[in-house]
Image (tube, rainbow, N blue to C red):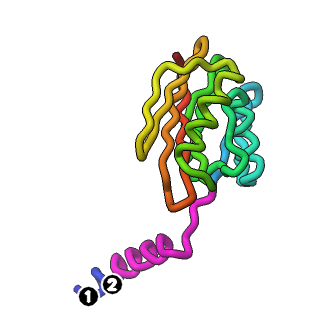
């Protein structure tokens, strides 16, 4: 009987060890070439970050913020790109609120609605697109911005 339980116990222990503090998820981008059907996977975080910025060129990112690759995802089709872009960095929620209310209109976005609080939200639209921006403090002088981009 002990041999029967020994193998599952070792297997479970091995799986738990792999999920321990030394395990890190790697952000990968997998693309399929529509002409050839070839699948390519890239793991370079700089390429991935550049791709996220290229997907949403009309959405400004504060200079003191970096894209959180673990919390960001995009879906692209021939007709549109949608997704969630998350950034983190220095700055308070009020400064970020002012940044987006000033910068989004310069990119052709119109403010639909907004509210300011400990967690602030801004909603912008432009023909064919909509973005919900959530601003939240993550520390004394740090913050997170979540941008949810979709069709209008």
Q: Secondary structure at mark 1?
A: helix
| Residue 28 vertical position relative to residue 18 in the rendered view, above or below | above
Which contiguous range is marked in magenta? 7-26
59 inside magenta stretch:
no
Q: Position of residue 105 (x, y in %)?
A: 65, 22
Q: Secondary structure at mark 2?
A: helix
Estimate how packed mark 2 is, as few (under 14), some (14 to 19) or many (20 or more) residues with alpha carbons within 10 Å. few
| Residue 30 vertical position relative to residue 9 in the rendered view, above or below | above
The rendered magenta stretch, by its main secondary structure, is classed as helix
Q: How many numbered discs?
A: 2
Q: Nearer the viewer, residue 45 or 90?
A: 90
Residue at point 54% right, 21% down? 111
* Residue that label 1 marks: 2
Which numbered tag is attached to residue 97?
none
* Residue that label 2 marks: 6
Q: Nearer the viewer, residue 39 or 29?
A: 29
Circles 2 and 1: CB atoms closer than 8 Å: yes
| Cα gap from disc 2 to disc 1, whole angstroms | 6 Å
Q: Position of residue 55 (x, y in %)?
A: 69, 32
């Amino acid at each position: 009987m002990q041999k029967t339980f020994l193998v599952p116990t070792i297997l479970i222990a091995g799986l738990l060890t792999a999920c321990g503090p030394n395990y890190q998820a790697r952000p990968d981008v997998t693309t399929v070439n529509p002409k050839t059907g070839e699948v390519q996977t890239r793991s370079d975080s700089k390429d991935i970050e550049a791709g996220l910025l290229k997907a949403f060129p009309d959405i400004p990112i504060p200079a003191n913020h970096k894209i959180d690759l673990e919390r960001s995802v995009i879906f692209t089709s021939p007709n549109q790109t949608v997704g969630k872009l998350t950034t983190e960095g220095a700055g308070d929620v009020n400064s970020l609120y002012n940044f987006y209310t000033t910068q989004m209109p310069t990119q052709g976005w119109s403010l639909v609605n907004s509210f300011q609080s400990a967690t602030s939200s801004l909603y912008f639209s432009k023909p064919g697109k909509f973005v919900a921006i959530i601003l939240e403090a993550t520390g004394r002088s740090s913050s997170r911005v979540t941008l949810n981009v979709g069709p209008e």
